[in-house]
Amino acid sequence: MRVVVEENHDLPLVRVQLALPSGAADDPVADDGLTNFATELMARGAGGKTRAELDRAFDALGTGLDPVTDLDGTYFEVTVLRDKLEAALTLLSDVVLRPDFVSSEADKLRREIAAQLDELRDDDGQLVRRFFTRQLYGAHPYGRTIIGTEKTLPRLDGARAKAWHARQVTNSGLLVGFAGDVAANEAQALAERAFGALPTGDAGMHRYPDPPTRRGLRLTIVDKPERTQSQILWGQPAPQWGTPDFFALQVATCAYGGTFTARLMNEVRSKRGFSYGASARLGQGRGRKALVAHIFPSLEQTPEALALVLELHREWVEGGITEDELAFARGYLARSFAFTMATPEDRLELAIGCAVAGLPVDHATRFTERISAVTLDDTRRAMKAWLTPRDLEVCIVSTADALIPRLRNAGLLDGVDLVVVPYTD
Amino acid sequence: MGIDSTLVSEHPFALDGKGGTARLVVRHHRLPNGLELLLVRDPIAPIFAYQTWFRVGSRHERDGITGIAHLFEHLMFNQTESHPPGEFDRLIEMAGGDTNAATWADWTYYRDNLPASELRLAVELESDRMAHLVLGDKQVESEREVVANERRFRVEDDVDGFLSEEMFRIAFTVHPYHWPTIGWMRDIQAITIDDCRQFYRTYYAPNNATVVLVGDFDEAAALDLIGQHYGKIPSSQIPPDRAPAEPEQTAERRAVYRKPVMSDKLRMAWKAPPVTDPDHVRLEVLSEILFGGNSSRLQRKLVSDGEIAASVSAAATPFRDVGLYEIGLSLQRGKASAEAEAVIVEELERLKREPPSMEELVVAQTRLETRFVRDLRPSGGKAEGLGHFHTTFGDYRALFRLYDGYRSVTADEISAVAARVFDDRRRTVIIAEPDPDAAPDELDDDEDTVVDGLTGDEPTEVA
């Protein structure tokens, strides 16, 4: 167990965050959604307390416990007034060390997750991310859906959750973070008392293989009725977070779509009004995540907007960024880093994020220095090594029978691997 | 040489009984031209939050120019006499900062977060666009299309945004809360350059604004800078707020839509007191008892135990005039909204008859206090709290009274406010039902919508 403390006594408030470096990417393909299922179930009956009793106890402390699972890790977080800290840790200890995995709660949780899948389909932004990830990663661990699918959900039960807990929830991998009104030595003692009894075991931190590479442009249209605009994501796998090439691409991506005045925003929104948002980001995780860009133009303007961004993408990858863009992006990334460390909670989140990703402890302290050292040659070399503008994964949530003729008329389907899937898939 | 400001008041940034922030002090100054300043030196990190709150929002619009307050928020980032298009954002980003804005019914505010060394930049840019914005056809046309796309994103293609818009459209018939802050699409397309110029001249003046500065800065130097840059901006004749009073609602209003959703979505709302009314804080505590944590009454009855809904939430609008207390649910597949309605009404009726237990009351108060303190952690959170309360209540100190207000609410007051608010005749119900096969050209208003008791004159805008 490792304890991280960001001490600050300005407000009578403490955030406690537990993290395990084992997330949805570690779920077997057939059990997609297991980590999320197991951690949710842990909070629905523990230490002999029923779900209702646990909910009442957390509510009485002015907080709530909503476990969060992402691809790389699992997190339990509560924020309480200082005088409720010890009681909150006692409850957290029950959830983490002594979950009961009640069968009736497992049944109910499956139904709740099925309802979450329905809610997800009502949100076009979430839909496009889910389908884009599925297409980009396929069977790779980063292709897992986190909450599972209608196919895997029936397999998830209390027994599998219990086995997951025995395997993954260990002293070896646990991170316990405190931010706020608690002294470092007191936090250490509280963490030992609450979680010291966890058994040793797998420390998590599994490494993942490289994501699949594809040749050519695949365009997936997620068909949903009555859309007046198209949610469009495009991208491809990126280098590992924390590597020199990642820093170089981070600078180049910032110039491409990382700020309000970057190329994408300028060309798509400011000059043409095609989309309210236009952005590009490099994913950060323990394994190789992706460069992903996003716009959402009207249905009528989708062909023109799509042609524009594909051309902008090609120009960016083949032509690189300019000296001015380099200077701007380096300066922006270096100076704005202060905001990711502004509050004790920010600093804790950064420390835990780095630890779960397996980054060295000096990642945060050396970030500005590393970004400032990136040269134009570094960006060009990294772009050449990792990006190929014709090998893109493109995913669009829109109304297929209205969109496809428009794309065909614009010549945007020539030589493209077109896939159409219903949004209920 | 700066223009001197007058210190109007000062108040410790303290939460009674907790004391942790007592070292921070809010100082309220006023310039001769009417600009109000709220300053809190909080050197928690080498950064600051700079916010400008204007007392103008969608309530100051009229039919035909709905959405102009929000469109104007976009235009404020475009061009001034000394800065070409895009330079505002560029300069903020070059300094490592970020900037954005928000518009709602009663206010519009602009926020900049910057490193501590960049206070001069914030003051120069914000004072410049308060007085020297360039408004031409080119600027308006480029933002018009962006806002139309924002509307498609937030309303047309978002069922929750659509239902929220419909709720206010139907619940309010006369008051400007009737129209959405983003505006009707037809008005977004029709607003003229003259409308924009008139709006700017009228409302963007120092005597209609409050600058809130929280973070790591030298107070004397900040006051001097602000005086230099804002001091000579002339004040304006702000027209009196003539928002017509909404007539008393005398019958339930109800509308049903078919949408491409997987399960029913239900919204119920009742007319609710203004944010300045003592009943508002009672309603917040009531809402926490019913919907707050996982153990709250209706989270259990609708979600965890009842398994009727996938999610449920509720809130009272923090508006200056009578607003809404709104409940929103996504139902589980196969469950009918009528079943959820019955559960909600039963619980509201029970609350009218029986005050909540002391345990329920204390849990709700503790949760609200924790959230209140948590939201004030970042400099931007402090600035937002002060700006909102000073703009809406006319006095930033109302922020601190709210914290004490939660604890002073009694169980009997909860029952009494339930009886006053949850009157069937003042209820509006909006439902979206699944219609996965519908296509835009297969629907018309008659097929798509059933509206009972609707007294508004807006045409129903459905697919």
Image (spheres, coloured by chain):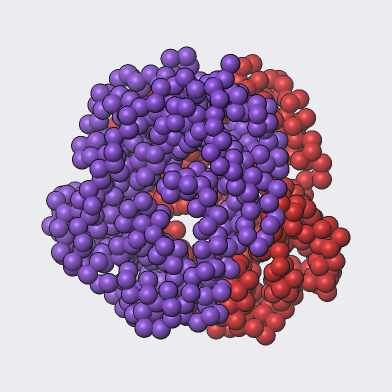
Chain colours: A red, B purple
Residue A207 in sight in this render: no
Give the residue at x 43% y 78%: B412
User: At 42% from the left edge and 47% from the top edge, which residue is drawn?
Assistant: B392
Q: Nearer the viewer, residue B88 or B149?
A: B88
Please name whichever residue, A317 or B61, is drawn nearer the observer in this view of the structure: B61
Q: Is residue B99 above or below residue B166?
A: above
Looking at the picture, how far across and down is residue A370, in whole percent?
A: 76, 31
User: Which quadrant of the structure image shows residue A366?
Assistant: top right
* In the image: residue B369, left or right of residue B201: right
Q: Is residue A221 left or right of residue A8?
A: left
* Quadrant placement of the C terminus of chain A: bottom left
Which quarter of the figure has residue B344? bottom left
Q: Quadrant of residue B448?
A: bottom left
- Which of the image's four quarters has the N terminus of chain A? bottom right
Between residues A421 and A417, which one lies in front from this camera angle? A421
Total labels drawn: 0
> Left or right: B131 with respect to B438?
right
Query: Is residue B258 found left or right of A332 in the rendered image?
Result: left
- Coordinates of residue A167 in the picture (x, y in percent): 75, 70
Residue A238, compared with residue B421, is above or below; it is above
* Up/down of B393 relative to B237, above or below: below
Q: Residue at x 25, y 30 (%)?
A: B191
- State the image coordinates of residue A92 (x, y, percent, origin top left): 70, 71
Residue A83 drawn above or below residue B170: below
Residue B128 visible within the image: yes
Query: What residue is at 50 percent from the left and 82 percent from the top?
Result: B357
Looking at this view, name the residue that lies furthest to the top: B82
x and y, in percent, of residue B259 in the image:
28, 58
